[in-house]
Amino acid sequence: MNFQENLDAYTPDFTPYDWTPEDRDLLAPFVTNLDGLVTVLRNLPPEIAGALCSRASRATKSLVEVLLKEYLHPILQGEDKKLAEELKETISFLRNHGFKNILNNQRAQAFYAKWLSQYGDDSIAQLTGTHVVLWGISQVALKFVEDQRIGIEPLEKSTRYVSYGNKVGGRYLYYIPKPDLERLGMMKEYAETLDNLFDTYGRLLPELIVWLRENYEEKESILEKKAFDTLRGLLPMATLSQVAFRGNAQALEYLISRMARYPLGEFRWLSSALKTELDKEIPSLLLRLGDERSQEYQHYLSERYGAVRSFVKKELHETYKDAFFRAGTKPEVQLVEYDPDAEIKILAGILFKEAHGGWDEALQVVKSMNQEAKRELFKRYLLNRTARWWKTGRAFENSYLRFEIVMDAGAYRDLQRHRMLTQERQRFSAHHGYNVPKELIESGLAPRFEKALVKAGELFATLEAHDAELAQYVVPMAYRMRFYQWQNFRSFFWETELRTISQGHPDYRYIEHEKYRLVKEKFPLLAEFMLVDTNAYSIARRGTEERIAKKEKEIIEKLGKRSAQ
């Protein structure tokens, strides 16, 4: 495949950097790309790479700039002259004699080829990984990346902690699929509609903060984040964001293949850019991407849903129109499928591990037990479990639940992060209505909020008639979308307990409370052992800053003790 296809046409029109020559010298050993939106981290200790990537959710700028200004500059400009000199020497050595340069000779390449041929691409690829930073990709692309279930661990820029109301280089940060919009003659309408969403966000933000200040006795920093949280529904799915992740080589290869022939040009650009940067760090593990078999696989990945879509449009659209396209009017959760023998199967799983009989024998033993005996066995297995991070055992994986959920796209972004289950979503659309936060209704700001949403919804309808994939970009996060979750009880315990804590967003807390209520009706004995917070909170993340400061102090003390040993 030609990985340069459409690269120039679909590259995001956004330049985040303005490096000095000195900046470039400092950063060159640690990142593969100083000028683009996709870069691979290199030559960094695991702790530093991990700490840097963890900043993705709160950083307003690129992590490359964070590396420069919060890691390198403080050392070089600090009081410890010896440490500063050692860093300079390290940077100089890596720039002139980096690991790749050391191995850049025929003997080393022959040695590596021997290992690769003997132990197989996948065997090595599963154990070899690297850190990647994607800065300036749309929410549509970001969600597609995060759909990948295993092999990558992404962390994205938050819409709850960072303001999106500022312009960079005279424009708001949203993706513009120029070739497609120019083909449809809709560039002007697209820009006007999305600018209006960001303008509305920027105008409502200070007004909402004033109202929150008058109605909540909280710190200014907490009220500011509450305002970001409340207004994020205005942000379109075209909003440019940042995601950092560590991925093993096999997962990265799959990610590139998933995007290589995707209908959206941004995805094809991202596939190409990602391949280019990874070739600078792990080229030998991506060699087969250019093979004919890989190209056939990429075609399979991109065409299968298109084939289904054309079948639906041709054969089923009229017959099942209401079933396929019914619009929602509010957030909703349905338990559409469950196993009535869930408790029996989970208890059988508990017994199975401690006996030498078969599965059928374990089932029969559980079926002969009365309710109190079952409760006692659950108590012993969970052993006075008092914290949600005390994970339940694998016995809870022996039965499944299927939930169908309609919720706003903004809050969905958090539930999507639960990857050890089966999730499948429909395209982002304006078909299911939108949410208006109660704070906007009470403050009298809702009419302007809704006006911007309606205008975006109208543009969505126009674009969808031409290209349903493309239309996703203009959908604001306040609009709802439909998806299902097929998860075992172990996954259900973890997700529902985590997403109902006091720090959680009220929109997804509502969804998880509904899931818990539905399961409790069917399986009251299991629900007894869940650690679900059913309280209501007017301000999420209460006390978070204090906890972070305390945790930081504890970590510093632990590291100090370890260094002294």
Image: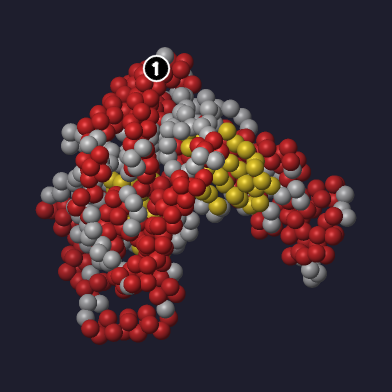
Q: Residue at x 49, y 21 (%)?
A: 438
Specify whether residue 508 is in view.
no
359 or 456: which is nearer to us?
456
Left/right of residue 425 with respect to residue 488 in the rendered view:
left
Identify the residue at horizontal 51%, vertical 39% (top origin).
318
Q: Is residue 231 left or right of residue 362?
A: left
The x and y percentages for residue 344 are: 78, 53
Q: 315 or 286: which is nearer to us?
A: 315
How many numbered discs sit on the rendered protein? 1
User: Residue at (69%, 53%) from the top-left corner?
Assistant: 399
The quarter of the rendered structure image containing the N terminus is bottom left
508 w.r.t. 253: above or below: above
Question: What residue is disc 1 on?
Answer: 447
Image quadrant assignment for residue 513: top right
Q: Is residue 14 above or below residue 433?
A: below
Circle 1: element type = helix
Locate residue 164, reporting x and y percent.
Answer: 31, 33
The 10 Å Cα crowd at callout 1, few under 14, some 14 to 19, many 20 or more, is few
> Which corner quadrant of the image does residue 109 belong to?
bottom left
Q: Does residue 312 appear anywhere in the picture?
A: yes
Q: Quadrant of the C terminus?
A: bottom left
Amino acid carrying label 1: it is Pro
The spot of residue 460 in percent (x, y) is 36, 33
Task: Using the image as rendered, state which of residue 468 and residue 512 is in the foreground.
Answer: 468
193 sits to left or right of 25: right
Closer to the camera in the image, 549 or 249: 249
Structure colour scheme: secondary structure
Relative height, residue 403 to residue 40 (above, below): above
Outermost residue toward the left?
21
Q: Position of residue 453 (x, y in %)?
A: 38, 26
Residue depicted at 45% across the width and 61% down the height: 151
